[in-house]
Image (spheres, grey):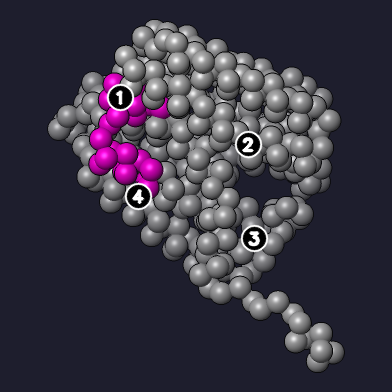
Amino acid sequence: MASSALHEPPAPSRAALYLNLIRWDRPAGWLLLLWPTLSALWIAADGFPGWHLLAVFVLGTVLMRSAGCCINDVADRNFDRHVKRTAHRPVTSGAITPRDALLFGAVLALAAFALVLTTNPATILLSFPALAVTLVYPYAKRVLAMPQAVLGVAFSFGIPMAFAAALGGTGWSLSAIGDAVPPHAWALLLVNLFWVLAYDTEYAMVDRDDDLRIGMRTSAITLGRRDVAGVMAFYALHLAGWWVLGTMLGLDGLFRVGLVLAAAQAVWHGTMIRTRSRDGCFAAFRMNHWLGCTVFCGVALDLALR
């Protein structure tokens, strides 16, 4: 007994637990938020937006995604213990208390808000509904048949905020937001929502059996045997929407090359999820940030070479 105890791995440090809480070792999560936000920022600024706005949105994305993980893990702690993939998360396992996780999430959210305060009134005003959607999403899974739609709004709200930061003035009113966020920015939010539906349905397919057992609602359960077809339809709507909006905005050759390469990745993901294996669906989900990166590179290069 003494010999086996000597070979037990040491307990993780407090810092390691908090890094695990915010998924620091899995950057794919915040990259899924970052790429569409940067695409919007480049379009709004008609090219490179400057180091200040770039730093605000990169750091703000990392901080808010990390805060969202804290909120989500507290809200789902009683469900996560019944799901193999999430049973050992710090809050679920009891290594971090819900109170401490929420306090840490609040500190992260305040740090993100401090960054927003360096922009302009329109961006600051938009940060409040962005936070509200982030807080609501974990509970949408209890009542909505396709809660990924709420996640899609949460993961896409950086788009209107990017336009507001690049184009906003000094007014503190709803009309100031209207002036700073043109209709095509909201259209980009809608287009991005379809991408979130695609990759988060892949994610939900990983946990479908566990979610059915505990009564969680997801798009994978709602779509049933049409899940693979649904994912591919969401990809198609996302990329077709980008093609139409990009053309309207004057984006041309390199942008379209980026979309074609992104479409090839979507087809590849389709081959990974067609058997509905946990490993295949999870791998497809984790690779989605490259699709978003490809679209962004097409946008940025096209604007740079005009």
Q: Amino acid at mark 2?
A: Met
> Magenta part of the protein: which range?
39-60
As measured in the structure, the alpha-carbon distance from the residue carrying label 2 to the one carrying label 3 is: 22 Å
Of the pair 119 and 249, the residue shown nearer to us: 249
Does residue 179 sit above or below 97 in this rendering?
A: above
Q: Earlier in the sequence, mark 4 or mark 2?
A: 4
Residue linked to disc 2: 287
Q: Earlier in the sequence, mark 1 or mark 2?
A: 1
Q: Amino acid at mark 4?
A: Ala
- The residue depicted at 70 percent of the width and 25 percent of the height is 268
As measured in the structure, the alpha-carbon distance from the residue carrying label 4 to the one carrying label 2 is: 26 Å
Place residue 80 in its image quadrant. Answer: bottom right
The question of residue 201 being in magenta is answered with no
The secondary element bearing badge 4 is classed as: helix
| Image location of residue 137, percent across then percent down | 54, 41
Does residue 195 sit above or below 76 in this rendering?
A: above
As measured in the structure, the alpha-carbon distance from the residue carrying label 3 to the one carrying label 1 is: 40 Å
- The residue depicted at 69 percent of the width and 35 percent of the height is 284
Q: Dots 3 and 1: beta carbons under 8 Å? A: no
